[in-house]
Amino acid sequence: MQLALQNIFVQSLCALFACVAYGIICNAPRKELLYCGLNGFWGWFVYRLLYIQNENAAIATLMATMAVTAAARFLAYRREAPSILYHIPGILPLVPGTAVYQTMTSAINGQILETYSNALSIFQLAGAIGIGSLLILVLPHWAFAFSPLKKK
């Protein structure tokens, strides 16, 4: 268990660096880059913990997306910035890129059943990302105001 947690932490650190790099590419403000990365760290950490427990990628993706979206909304309130600034980089590690690659490879090789299976997996994961985001985004802005903002 100790080794698994270390592995999850290292993977989450890699997600942090990937999200910071994505923020740099998309011209996010420099002072917000760390928060973009931390949101990606948080999302991947939640995903891996849940995936190890129940081995269901769709449920783990749904819950991790909800965690990322809630953190993005909280950061948006605290940092007085748009939530999309933290939301998109935070979701980046959860995007099913490997499944898309496997689907295209199996389609090119003429493996029809494997192509359909992989495509179904992609739709499940993409749906989990969409639904997880919507469930949190429909909450009112004040729901993320855990403490009042300081007057400038």
Image (spheres, rainbow, N blue to C red):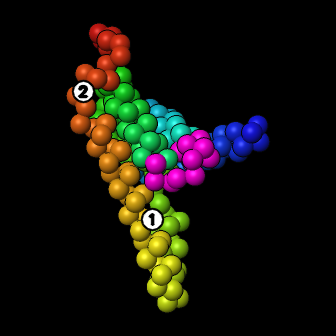
For the point 58% across and 52% down, the residue is: 55
Label 1 Cα crowd, 10 Å radius (few <14 / some 14-19 / many 20+): some
Per the image, label 1 sits on a secondary structure element best described as helix
Q: Which mark is residue 121?
A: 1
User: Is 54 placed left or right of 29 in the picture?
Assistant: right
Image quadrant for the N terminus? Answer: top right
Q: In front: 41, or 106?
A: 106
Seen as rendered, the residue at the extreme front is 54
Q: In front: 31, or 108?
A: 108
Residue 31 percent coordinates (x, y): 44, 32
User: Is 119 placed left or right of 38 in the picture?
Assistant: left
Residue 16 percent coordinates (x, y): 56, 42
Q: Is residue 99 magenta?
A: no
Q: In front: 27, or 4?
A: 4
The residue under label 2 is which amino acid type? His
Q: Main secondary structure of the magenta part?
A: helix
